[in-house]
Image (cartoon, grey):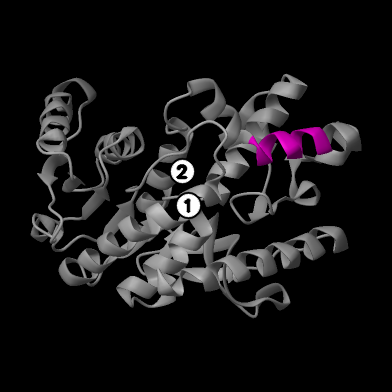
Amino acid sequence: MGKKVTVVGAGFYGSTTAQRLAEYDVFDTVVITDIVEGKPAGLALDLNQSRPVEGFETTVVGVTTGPDGEGYEAIAGSDVVVVTAGLPRKPGMSRMDLLETNAKIVRQVAENVARHAPDAVVIVVSNPLDEMTALAQLATGFPKNRVLGQAGMLDSARFTNFVAEALAVPVRSVQTLTLGSHGDTMVPVPSRSTVDGRPLREAMPAEQIEELVVKTRNGGAEVVALLKTGSAYYAPSAAAARMARAVAEDSGEVMPVCAWVDGEYGISGVYLGVEAEIGAGGVRRIVETDLDPDELASLKSAAEAVRTKQSDITDM
Protein backbone atom coordinates (compact mmCIF):
# COMPACT_ATOMS: atom_id res chain seq x y z
CA MET A 1 0.00 0.00 0.00
CA GLY A 2 1.29 3.43 -0.93
CA LYS A 3 1.39 6.31 1.50
CA LYS A 4 -1.59 8.63 1.66
CA VAL A 5 -1.93 12.03 3.31
CA THR A 6 -5.00 14.21 3.65
CA VAL A 7 -5.05 17.99 4.08
CA VAL A 8 -8.35 19.24 5.50
CA GLY A 9 -8.99 22.81 4.38
CA ALA A 10 -8.13 24.24 0.95
CA GLY A 11 -7.33 27.81 1.92
CA PHE A 12 -3.87 29.29 1.39
CA TYR A 13 -2.41 27.22 4.24
CA GLY A 14 -4.02 23.96 3.16
CA SER A 15 -3.35 24.30 -0.56
CA THR A 16 0.29 25.28 -0.01
CA THR A 17 0.75 22.35 2.38
CA ALA A 18 -0.76 20.01 -0.22
CA GLN A 19 1.60 21.40 -2.86
CA ARG A 20 4.66 20.83 -0.65
CA LEU A 21 3.55 17.31 0.25
CA ALA A 22 2.96 16.42 -3.41
CA GLU A 23 6.31 17.84 -4.52
CA TYR A 24 8.17 15.76 -1.91
CA ASP A 25 7.11 12.74 -4.02
CA VAL A 26 7.06 10.44 -0.96
CA PHE A 27 3.27 9.90 -1.00
CA ASP A 28 1.23 8.02 -3.58
CA THR A 29 -1.78 10.25 -2.92
CA VAL A 30 -2.47 13.68 -1.44
CA VAL A 31 -6.16 14.31 -0.70
CA ILE A 32 -7.28 17.90 -0.19
CA THR A 33 -10.78 18.60 1.17
CA ASP A 34 -12.86 21.71 1.69
CA ILE A 35 -16.47 22.74 2.24
CA VAL A 36 -16.38 25.12 -0.75
CA GLU A 37 -17.92 23.28 -3.68
CA GLY A 38 -15.40 22.50 -6.42
CA LYS A 39 -12.46 24.36 -4.87
CA PRO A 40 -10.43 21.28 -3.80
CA ALA A 41 -11.08 19.55 -7.13
CA GLY A 42 -9.89 22.64 -9.00
CA LEU A 43 -6.72 22.86 -6.89
CA ALA A 44 -6.06 19.14 -7.40
CA LEU A 45 -6.45 19.50 -11.16
CA ASP A 46 -4.02 22.42 -11.19
CA LEU A 47 -1.47 20.64 -8.96
CA ASN A 48 -1.59 17.46 -11.05
CA GLN A 49 -0.84 19.52 -14.14
CA SER A 50 2.34 20.78 -12.48
CA ARG A 51 3.72 17.23 -12.18
CA PRO A 52 5.48 17.14 -15.56
CA VAL A 53 7.23 20.44 -14.78
CA GLU A 54 8.26 19.64 -11.20
CA GLY A 55 8.84 15.95 -11.88
CA PHE A 56 6.75 14.28 -9.17
CA GLU A 57 4.34 11.34 -9.50
CA THR A 58 2.13 11.89 -6.42
CA THR A 59 -1.53 12.09 -7.40
CA VAL A 60 -3.57 14.91 -5.88
CA VAL A 61 -7.29 14.32 -5.28
CA GLY A 62 -9.71 17.12 -4.36
CA VAL A 63 -12.97 16.42 -2.53
CA THR A 64 -15.79 18.70 -1.37
CA THR A 65 -17.11 17.75 2.06
CA GLY A 66 -20.59 18.40 3.46
CA PRO A 67 -21.99 19.36 6.88
CA ASP A 68 -22.94 15.76 7.69
CA GLY A 69 -19.58 14.24 6.78
CA GLU A 70 -20.28 13.75 3.08
CA GLY A 71 -17.09 13.25 1.08
CA TYR A 72 -14.92 12.16 4.00
CA GLU A 73 -14.88 8.57 2.69
CA ALA A 74 -12.14 9.83 0.32
CA ILE A 75 -9.70 10.12 3.24
CA ALA A 76 -9.94 6.39 4.10
CA GLY A 77 -6.54 4.78 4.58
CA SER A 78 -4.72 8.07 5.23
CA ASP A 79 -1.44 7.66 7.12
CA VAL A 80 -1.46 11.34 8.07
CA VAL A 81 -4.20 13.97 8.27
CA VAL A 82 -3.21 17.64 8.47
CA VAL A 83 -6.05 19.76 9.87
CA THR A 84 -5.87 23.35 8.60
CA ALA A 85 -9.64 23.97 8.73
CA GLY A 86 -10.86 27.05 10.57
CA LEU A 87 -10.92 30.80 10.25
CA PRO A 88 -7.63 32.71 9.98
CA ARG A 89 -6.90 35.73 12.13
CA LYS A 90 -7.78 39.26 11.10
CA PRO A 91 -5.69 42.28 12.10
CA GLY A 92 -6.07 42.98 15.83
CA MET A 93 -7.32 39.48 16.62
CA SER A 94 -5.45 37.19 18.97
CA ARG A 95 -5.25 33.45 18.35
CA MET A 96 -7.59 33.00 21.34
CA ASP A 97 -10.28 35.14 19.65
CA LEU A 98 -10.77 32.23 17.25
CA LEU A 99 -11.40 29.68 20.01
CA GLU A 100 -15.15 29.17 19.91
CA THR A 101 -15.59 29.36 16.14
CA ASN A 102 -12.71 27.07 15.31
CA ALA A 103 -13.55 24.61 18.10
CA LYS A 104 -16.81 23.71 16.35
CA ILE A 105 -15.02 23.24 13.02
CA VAL A 106 -12.13 21.20 14.44
CA ARG A 107 -14.44 18.96 16.45
CA GLN A 108 -16.51 18.11 13.37
CA VAL A 109 -13.37 17.42 11.32
CA ALA A 110 -11.82 15.29 14.06
CA GLU A 111 -14.95 13.14 14.42
CA ASN A 112 -14.96 12.49 10.66
CA VAL A 113 -11.25 11.65 10.69
CA ALA A 114 -11.85 9.12 13.48
CA ARG A 115 -14.68 7.58 11.47
CA HIS A 116 -12.90 7.29 8.13
CA ALA A 117 -9.14 7.24 8.91
CA PRO A 118 -8.95 5.55 12.33
CA ASP A 119 -5.24 4.71 12.02
CA ALA A 120 -4.03 8.16 10.95
CA VAL A 121 -1.60 10.44 12.73
CA VAL A 122 -3.30 13.84 13.06
CA ILE A 123 -1.30 17.07 12.76
CA VAL A 124 -3.32 20.10 13.87
CA VAL A 125 -2.48 23.59 12.64
CA SER A 126 -5.77 25.40 13.35
CA ASN A 127 -5.61 28.27 15.86
CA PRO A 128 -5.53 28.64 18.81
CA LEU A 129 -3.07 25.81 18.27
CA ASP A 130 -2.55 24.29 21.71
CA GLU A 131 -6.26 24.23 22.49
CA MET A 132 -7.27 22.86 19.07
CA THR A 133 -4.69 20.06 19.37
CA ALA A 134 -6.16 19.03 22.73
CA LEU A 135 -9.68 19.22 21.29
CA ALA A 136 -8.75 17.10 18.27
CA GLN A 137 -7.40 14.38 20.58
CA LEU A 138 -10.58 14.40 22.66
CA ALA A 139 -12.84 14.36 19.59
CA THR A 140 -10.96 11.57 17.79
CA GLY A 141 -10.35 9.50 20.91
CA PHE A 142 -6.97 8.62 19.38
CA PRO A 143 -3.97 7.79 21.59
CA LYS A 144 -2.30 11.05 22.55
CA ASN A 145 0.92 10.22 20.69
CA ARG A 146 -1.06 10.14 17.40
CA VAL A 147 -2.37 13.70 17.73
CA LEU A 148 0.13 16.56 17.67
CA GLY A 149 0.22 20.22 16.74
CA GLN A 150 2.46 22.34 14.54
CA ALA A 151 3.90 25.33 16.38
CA GLY A 152 7.49 24.98 17.54
CA MET A 153 8.73 24.17 14.02
CA LEU A 154 7.27 27.45 12.77
CA ASP A 155 8.28 29.57 15.76
CA SER A 156 11.83 28.19 15.71
CA ALA A 157 12.04 28.92 11.98
CA ARG A 158 10.97 32.51 12.61
CA PHE A 159 13.52 32.90 15.44
CA THR A 160 16.26 31.41 13.22
CA ASN A 161 15.39 33.73 10.35
CA PHE A 162 15.42 36.83 12.56
CA VAL A 163 18.80 35.90 14.06
CA ALA A 164 20.30 35.23 10.61
CA GLU A 165 18.99 38.56 9.30
CA ALA A 166 20.29 40.48 12.34
CA LEU A 167 23.78 38.97 12.03
CA ALA A 168 23.81 38.90 8.20
CA VAL A 169 24.73 35.20 8.17
CA PRO A 170 23.24 32.27 6.19
CA VAL A 171 20.14 30.77 7.82
CA ARG A 172 21.77 27.33 7.69
CA SER A 173 24.46 28.54 10.10
CA VAL A 174 21.86 29.37 12.77
CA GLN A 175 20.13 26.89 15.09
CA THR A 176 17.39 28.08 17.44
CA LEU A 177 14.68 26.50 19.54
CA THR A 178 11.28 27.64 20.84
CA LEU A 179 9.13 25.69 23.30
CA GLY A 180 6.00 26.44 25.33
CA SER A 181 2.78 27.60 23.72
CA HIS A 182 2.05 28.96 20.25
CA GLY A 183 1.17 32.39 21.56
CA ASP A 184 1.85 34.74 24.44
CA THR A 185 3.60 32.10 26.55
CA MET A 186 5.98 31.00 23.80
CA VAL A 187 9.39 30.16 25.28
CA PRO A 188 12.31 30.85 22.92
CA VAL A 189 15.42 29.07 24.27
CA PRO A 190 18.56 31.16 23.74
CA SER A 191 20.66 28.68 25.77
CA ARG A 192 20.06 26.06 23.05
CA SER A 193 20.57 28.47 20.15
CA THR A 194 23.82 28.72 18.20
CA VAL A 195 25.47 30.56 15.30
CA ASP A 196 28.09 28.50 13.47
CA GLY A 197 28.19 26.28 16.53
CA ARG A 198 28.88 29.18 18.92
CA PRO A 199 26.32 30.01 21.61
CA LEU A 200 23.93 32.74 20.50
CA ARG A 201 24.77 34.67 23.68
CA GLU A 202 28.34 35.04 22.39
CA ALA A 203 27.16 36.23 18.99
CA MET A 204 24.86 39.05 20.09
CA PRO A 205 24.10 41.03 23.28
CA ALA A 206 21.33 39.92 25.64
CA GLU A 207 19.10 42.91 24.87
CA GLN A 208 19.21 42.17 21.13
CA ILE A 209 18.35 38.52 21.77
CA GLU A 210 15.37 39.68 23.84
CA GLU A 211 14.23 41.97 21.00
CA LEU A 212 14.31 39.01 18.60
CA VAL A 213 12.48 36.84 21.14
CA VAL A 214 9.66 39.40 21.25
CA LYS A 215 9.71 39.67 17.44
CA THR A 216 9.39 35.86 17.22
CA ARG A 217 6.49 35.82 19.67
CA ASN A 218 4.70 38.42 17.53
CA GLY A 219 5.80 36.90 14.21
CA GLY A 220 2.34 35.74 13.16
CA ALA A 221 0.63 38.97 14.18
CA GLU A 222 3.15 41.00 12.17
CA VAL A 223 2.29 39.02 9.03
CA VAL A 224 -1.47 39.33 9.70
CA ALA A 225 -1.18 43.11 10.14
CA LEU A 226 0.67 43.49 6.83
CA LEU A 227 -1.55 41.15 4.80
CA LYS A 228 -4.76 42.64 6.27
CA THR A 229 -6.73 39.66 4.96
CA GLY A 230 -5.68 36.20 6.11
CA SER A 231 -2.59 35.04 7.94
CA ALA A 232 0.81 33.47 7.26
CA TYR A 233 0.96 30.29 5.21
CA TYR A 234 4.31 29.82 3.45
CA ALA A 235 6.36 29.23 6.60
CA PRO A 236 3.55 27.44 8.50
CA SER A 237 2.88 25.07 5.59
CA ALA A 238 6.60 24.28 5.29
CA ALA A 239 6.63 23.32 8.97
CA ALA A 240 3.48 21.17 8.81
CA ALA A 241 4.64 19.40 5.64
CA ARG A 242 7.99 18.52 7.25
CA MET A 243 6.16 16.99 10.19
CA ALA A 244 3.93 14.93 7.89
CA ARG A 245 6.97 13.75 5.96
CA ALA A 246 8.71 12.64 9.18
CA VAL A 247 5.64 10.53 10.00
CA ALA A 248 5.42 9.04 6.49
CA GLU A 249 9.11 8.17 6.41
CA ASP A 250 9.18 7.00 10.05
CA SER A 251 12.30 9.14 10.24
CA GLY A 252 12.72 9.55 13.99
CA GLU A 253 13.58 13.20 13.39
CA VAL A 254 13.56 15.36 16.51
CA MET A 255 11.34 18.42 16.05
CA PRO A 256 9.75 21.03 18.30
CA VAL A 257 6.01 20.24 18.21
CA CYS A 258 2.91 20.55 20.35
CA ALA A 259 2.77 17.14 22.07
CA TRP A 260 1.24 15.52 25.13
CA VAL A 261 3.61 15.97 28.08
CA ASP A 262 3.37 13.47 30.92
CA GLY A 263 6.16 13.89 33.44
CA GLU A 264 8.86 15.48 31.30
CA TYR A 265 10.34 18.70 32.74
CA GLY A 266 8.24 18.01 35.85
CA ILE A 267 5.10 18.84 33.80
CA SER A 268 2.17 16.45 33.37
CA GLY A 269 -1.18 16.19 31.64
CA VAL A 270 -1.06 18.94 29.03
CA TYR A 271 -0.40 19.54 25.33
CA LEU A 272 2.68 21.78 25.15
CA GLY A 273 5.46 22.80 22.77
CA VAL A 274 8.41 20.48 23.38
CA GLU A 275 10.97 18.62 21.29
CA ALA A 276 9.81 15.17 20.21
CA GLU A 277 11.02 12.27 18.12
CA ILE A 278 8.57 11.81 15.25
CA GLY A 279 7.85 8.53 13.47
CA ALA A 280 5.12 6.44 11.87
CA GLY A 281 3.02 6.38 15.05
CA GLY A 282 3.33 10.12 15.65
CA VAL A 283 5.30 11.08 18.75
CA ARG A 284 7.71 8.29 19.72
CA ARG A 285 8.99 10.10 22.78
CA ILE A 286 9.45 13.56 24.24
CA VAL A 287 13.09 14.67 24.12
CA GLU A 288 14.03 16.61 27.25
CA THR A 289 16.78 19.14 26.79
CA ASP A 290 18.86 21.06 29.31
CA LEU A 291 17.25 24.41 30.03
CA ASP A 292 18.43 27.37 32.07
CA PRO A 293 16.46 27.80 35.33
CA ASP A 294 14.69 30.85 33.84
CA GLU A 295 13.77 28.94 30.68
CA LEU A 296 12.45 25.98 32.69
CA ALA A 297 10.39 28.32 34.88
CA SER A 298 8.94 29.94 31.74
CA LEU A 299 8.10 26.52 30.29
CA LYS A 300 6.28 25.55 33.50
CA SER A 301 4.39 28.86 33.45
CA ALA A 302 3.42 28.24 29.83
CA ALA A 303 2.17 24.77 30.78
CA GLU A 304 -0.12 26.16 33.47
CA ALA A 305 -1.47 28.91 31.18
CA VAL A 306 -2.18 26.38 28.44
CA ARG A 307 -3.66 23.86 30.90
CA THR A 308 -6.26 26.40 32.02
CA LYS A 309 -7.30 27.13 28.44
CA GLN A 310 -7.28 23.47 27.40
CA SER A 311 -9.65 22.63 30.25
CA ASP A 312 -12.13 25.12 28.73
CA ILE A 313 -12.44 23.17 25.46
CA THR A 314 -13.72 19.89 26.86
CA ASP A 315 -17.34 21.05 26.46
CA MET A 316 -16.88 22.70 23.07
Q: At 52% from the left edge and 70% from the top edge, which residue is drawn? A: 312
The disc, 1 or 2, on the residue closer to the chain's N-terminal end is 1
Q: What stretch is highlighted in magenta?
A: 210-218
Q: Image quadrant of residue 18?
A: top left
| Mark 2: secondary structure | helix
- Whether 64 is among the magenta residues is no
Work out how far the residue at label 1 is from the one at label 2, CA to CA, in angstroms: 7 Å
Residue under label 2: 239
Q: Are marks 1 and 2 in contact (CB under 8 Å)?
A: yes
10 Å crowding of disc 2: few (<14), some (14-19), many (20+): many
Where residue 277 appears, as percent x and y from the top left, is: 51, 63
Residue, x 12% and y 53% (percent of image)? Answer: 66
Q: Quadrant of residue 215?
A: top right
Numbered label attached to residue 150: 1
Quarter of the image holding residue 220? top right
Q: What residue type is labelled 1?
A: Gln
Location of residue 60 in the rendering, given as x and y in whole percent from the top left corner: 15, 40
Q: In this view, does 30 lie to the left or right of 282?
A: left
